[in-house]
Amino acid sequence: MSNIQLSSSQERVLTALVNLSEGRETPVQGREIAEAIDRNAGTVRNRMGSLSTIGLVKGVAGPDGGYIPTDDAYDALGIERLEDAATTPVEREGDPVEDVTVAEIDLSSVANPELCRAELVIRGPVGPFDAGDHVTVGPTPAAGLRLSGVVDATNVDGNSLLVRVDGMETPTGSAA
């Protein structure tokens, strides 16, 4: 992991850039980042300047320009690049959510089905999700797990969803 010390604001902007850039061929525009983290576009531009200076971001000029994270950006955040990794699809209210994949699923309270929660770390924008949405995740690449539940909360800073799990199943059809 990198020795670069980022301010919380720099980390938040860089994390949003990394998440929004996954699976894209084009640079991410500053306004997209600003919308994703609920900040002013000017604030994002200022942070991008400092992140560019330390080699974590490349700016692309022009009307279709924006920002691209460097390999060092992933290292500084301790995030694995998903270029060649398998994806885990996400559905919201039964419809696939484009440009979003699940990077991590953390389960809690699995011993009590009434209290089972999962934190889904998302690669891509969390903006399409709201509390009360029904989501389905999977199948996961290795185990084929499908998880479904209701979003309790979204966390823009951690790019995650807190989900009240109402079902889990494996390819053999056994439900949890």
Image (tube, grey):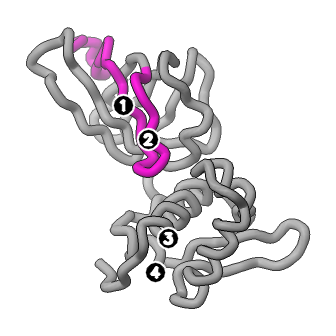
In the picture, measured across the screen, residue 30 lies left or right of residue 21, that is right
Q: Pointer 2: what residue?
A: 155
Q: Pointer 1: what residue?
A: 162
In the picture, measured across the screen, residue 23 lies left or right of residue 137, that is right
**Relative image position of residue 128 (x, y in whole percent):** 61, 33
Mark 4 neighbour density, 10 Å: few (under 14) some (14–19) many (20 or more): some
* Distance CA(mark 1)–CA(mark 3): 24 Å
Q: Which secondary structure lies at badge 4?
A: helix
For residue 59, above or below residue 128:
below
**Relative image position of residue 116 (x, y in whole percent):** 22, 20
Identity of the residue drawn at 40% across and 49% down:
158
* Distance CA(mark 2)–CA(mark 3): 17 Å
* Distance CA(mark 4)–CA(mark 3): 14 Å
Q: Nearer the viewer, residue 86 or 165?
A: 165
* Distance CA(mark 2)–CA(mark 1): 8 Å
**Relative image position of residue 24 (x, y in whole percent):** 67, 57
Identity of the residue drawn at 55% across and 30% down:
129
Magenta span of residues:
151-176
Pointer 2 with pointer 1, Cβ within 8 A? yes
Of tags 4 and 3, which is closer to the observer?
3
Q: Pointer 3: what residue?
A: 10
Query: Mark 4 or mark 2, which has the lower sequence index?
Result: 4
Three-letter code for the amino acid on which mark 3 is drawn: Gln
Q: Pointer 4: what residue?
A: 72
Q: Which secondary structure lies at badge 1?
A: strand
Q: Is residue 170 magenta?
A: yes
